[in-house]
Amino acid sequence: MSEIPAKATESNGPSGDATAEDATVGDEPNAAAPNADVPVVDGPAHDVPADEMWQSNPPGSIYDYIKVASFSIGADGLVDQWSVRAERLFGVAARDAVGKDPIEAFVPPELRAGGHRKMAEILDGREWTGVVPFRLPEDVLAPGGPGAGGERGAGGLEGVAEVYVMPTVTEEGERAAVCIVVDVRVLRQIETDLAASQAIFGQSPFGFLLFGTDLKVQRANRRFAAVFGGGVEDQRGRTVHDYLPRHEADRMAAALKRVLETGDSVTDMQIVGPAPGSSDRRHWSINLYRVHSGSGRPIGVAGLGTDVTRRHAAAREAAHARRNLALLNEAGARIGNSLDLETTARELLDVAVPGFCDLASVDLYQGLLDGDETPPGLADGSADLRRVAFASAVADAPFPDGSAPIDVGAVHRFAFTSPCADALRAARPRLVTGADDESASRLTKGLVQSTLAVPMVAHDTVVGLAQFSRTKGSEPFGERDRALAVELAARAAVCIDNARLYRREHERALILQRSLLPPGDPEASGLDIACRYLPGNAATEVGGDWFDVIELPGHRTALVVGDVMGRGLRAAVAMGELRTAVRTLALLDLEPAEVLSALDEIARGLGNPAGPQQATRGARKAADADLSEVYLATCVYAVYDAVTRRCTFANAGHLPPVLVEPGESALMLDVPPGMPLGVGGEPFEDVEVELPEGALLALYTDGLVESRDHPLDEGLNAFVRALNDAPTTLEDACDHVLNTLDTHHGEDDIALLMARVEGLPTEHVGDWTLPRDLKSVGRARELACDQLRAWDLERLCDTAELLVSELVTNALRYGEGDIRLRLLLDRTLVCEVWDASFVQPRRRRARDTDEGGRGLQLVGLLSAAWGSRRTPRGKTVWFEMALPDGDTEPMDAAEALLSLF
């Protein structure tokens, strides 16, 4: 044993600066045997080559962690050698220790007696091992030396050392000793650290791994071994590729290498892979950090793995819940913004694809779309359906034969035994997978993994079916997905049903409104007329705009344009009632202002169930206040006389007419607007305007000149400019105006009535004044016959002569003042007899014994129409006759006369 220091003298010590006494181990790197001399003398190191046996220990041996020192005692019992490690352990330089009695120098006084006895035994050749407390006086310590950091008592540095004393023999044959000293406090700390490390490493619920510098497992704890199988020792030498799939193992290896090279820790690295013996995907959170030796040299990487599969599943569930809530919020904001069926269906699919599924479609019952509330096959799910919307996030992917989606707009039906028909019958969602049956496999072959068939139920009525599909590779539908699909379909179903009901009402109101408008292009004497009516779009309710052209006696024409305030079926009905009232009042041949006054009374009566009398007294009930709003209306009423080319206007709160004279710019006529119909309390005024030949008159509603983006003033100015540039042809002029202005906004109905003035030619008018004389009857017959012959209407002479005679005779018998006879030729022949009496003629049925009283009956029998009207200076009695067409012979006057008896 005394040969060990001599051999160790050839080495520089484990840290490169130790003396011969410091070297006790010199075999393998990282060797840590506490009794280093044993393997040299007796152990299996005899089989190790000499160049490895005596090589220098690299940094990182056990001596980097424990404090070991050596010194020797000569035959005189004094220190004769003091190692550098002893200087570090005791903080005493060699010059202060060599030559001193170690018992006197380092042992406390109360222990010195026993120390001298032990020293004597040692020098007699006995080994000794024990724990010795020591104290170094202050005057012995090297100032600023390495021992300055120890524990100090009243007398100097205090400590406890474990001493192993080995007797030796000097060259002279004298007995001496070699002492190996270990700091007991460091050993106790290492024991404590090892115990704590073993407790944490072995008992931890988390998996611990220690990788060497070659990235192979050096040590694993029991928890890790329990998860991945095998014992703790079985994990040694494995790599991450033995535990994880290739792509995850490559990530893990790259992270280990990066941590080993840079020293940067990795926190919460997510790794996914199956556990041994299970196909379930597990999720781990990995933390990596580099491990160093006592000297600071990297010796490996430590890894802490935590199974976070449950946490990941909970996070996934929470993410799904947040996604579903976001989808529902988005559905509430986006679905139902339009009253159009197709738009609402597309809004549902815009929400569902791709946020909820990869493909989706909406089918609605064709019968319900056509207005049939109970179409055949509705109860058993076999009724015809129409595909109204389809969306796909994989639109470019090919579909196998027979699995391509149905085209939008196509009408189809599901087989009675199909899952979709079953979902419609039961009004419950159905999850369709390829394993269900043959019909189900048709829905899931190719790209589709599974399909949720969800019936769309609104107000306890199934209106259609929504299908949500996910492609292969996507996450399968779960119960939470089923509930979300039902909620989405239910919201869309209510909106679609509302849109369906609205469309039905809109179509009915539109049919009603169109039936109340003049069919085709109206005809009028002395006017070329063109008209246009544009309803609002499907998203807006039907309005109350209307126009009318009413033929009046004497080749006069009433032009009417109005707008009922409000929308929907009630507005259309109100428009029809007002239009009928206007036509009725027009037949009374009243002045325009009188027509509007009477119409105002009627409108107030329609808006108040108690009638116009109660309405004027302000006794409307609160429950009927909304009705009065529906029956407020604006209207402009104009009467045009083709003979005089004069037009009389009256306005009830409507936009002013626009007149374009030949060679002049368009201008808005200054017609007092008055109050809207139904308001009451204000009279209306007549304004008479002479219209030159070829002038253009335009009446319109506010939808033509006003919209959300274009205020009224801007629209009126644009309308005037469009009329200035309008083509000569009236039909082209209408189209030009509609194309120039913003008429596609769809916010309101649009009515446009345009008339070109074409006055009655002078040669088509015969006008005579006759005195109140019996001879005037014969004179009237002569004048009428001469005029008819001039117009080449000799075939009408006999009948016209008889009827003129009757009217002139009545004027002489019952009228006053001079008599005026006027014949007008246009599309028909009109004869008028004027007098100054305001008494209107009344037709009565004559008895068989009466000699008279049959004149007006004869007039009604032989003419196409007849009547009377008041004038400012009396009355006018007129009759109208159709012009001969060459095929129809007029009724014989004699036969007509005889038929009265």
Image (tube, rainbow, N blue to C red):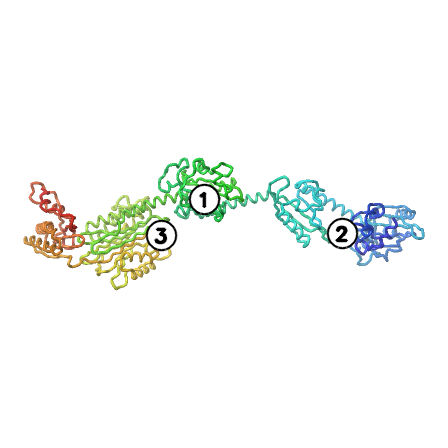
Which is closer to the viewer, label 3 or label 1? 1
Q: Pointers 2 and 3 in contact (CB under 8 A)?
A: no
Residue 196 vs 686, above or below: the answer is above
**Position of residue 41 measured from the top left corner of the image (x, y, whole percent):** 85, 47
Q: Callout 2: few (<14), some (14-19), or many (20+) C-alpha neighbours within 10 Å?
A: many
Dot 3 amino acid type? Gly
- Per the image, the residue denoted by label 2 is 60
Q: Callout 1: few (<14), some (14-19), or many (20+) C-alpha neighbours within 10 Å?
A: some
> In which image quadrant can residue 235 be found?
top right
> Could one spot residue 114 in this view of the protein?
yes
**Position of residue 579 measured from the top left corner of the image (x, y, whole percent):** 26, 48
> Could one spot residue 880 in this view of the protein?
no
Report the side of 345 relative to 151 (left or right). Answer: left
Dot 2 amino acid type? Gly
- Per the image, the residue denoted by label 3 is 746
Q: Residue 405 has which mark?
A: 1
Q: What element carries label 2?
A: loop
User: What number of labels is visible?
Assistant: 3
Q: Earlier in the sequence, mark 1 or mark 2?
A: 2
